[in-house]
Image (cartoon, rainbow, N blue to C red):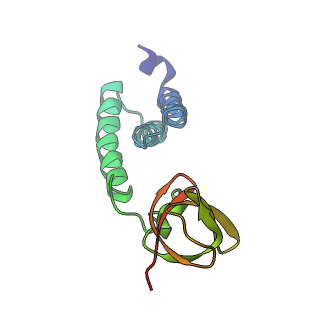
Amino acid sequence: MLLTQLGPWAWFVLGGVLLVAEIAAPGAFLLWLGLAALVTGAIAFGIALAWQLEVLVFAALAVVAVLIGRRISPAPGKASDRPFLNRRAEEFVGRVFTLDAPIMGGTGRVRIGDTVWRVEGPDVAAGRDVRVTGADGATLKVEPVEG
């Protein structure tokens, strides 16, 4: 059996393979199994154990490592403190801006900070306020603000 032939090195090899697999297919699951294998290898170096006991140590450490990993990893679907990080246009929905260029033929421009955004909506003269009602990629959907 490979485990008995390589001794503790088998656990280090297994740990390395699992860590490389984690890089290739990230999911933060193989990471914990890889760390458990590395710790098992370290234990096997310090204490001479039968291979069966090494497997049990690995299994116990894997369970503990996965539980710790689940505890410190963010839960899937948990709200982020920066929900618009990669959806910059959506953070403008509901806000009012002044048109930089008139909306003619359904398109116009609005300046937000140092960026000029393309807007779509009903024809409105430049200088009028518009409210962002939605976003489609880098295009903002707007409606005129009355008053």
Quarter of the rendering occupied by the N terminus: top left
- Give the percent coordinates (x, y) of residue 118: 61, 59
- The front one of 102 and 132 is 102
Tell me where residue 143 sits by quadrant: bottom left
Whether residue 118 is visible, yes or no, is no
Q: Which residue is drawn at 44% across and 63% down?
A: 83
- The front one of 34 and 4 is 34
Quarter of the rendering occupied by the C terminus: bottom left
Q: Which residue is drawn at 68% across and 67% down?
A: 115
| Residue 89 against residue 32 in the figure, above or below | below
- Give the percent coordinates (x, y) of residue 101: 66, 69
Is 101 left, or right, of 20 in this rendering?
right
Tell me where residue 123 sits by quadrant: bottom right
Whether residue 68 is visible, yes or no, is yes
- The front one of 93 and 43 is 93
- Give the percent coordinates (x, y) of residue 35: 45, 42
| Residue 103 against residue 62 in the figure, above or below | below
Q: Residue at x 52, y 29 (%)?
A: 17
- In the picture as drawn, the residue positioned furthest to the bottom comes out as 147
- Give the percent coordinates (x, y) of residue 61: 34, 43
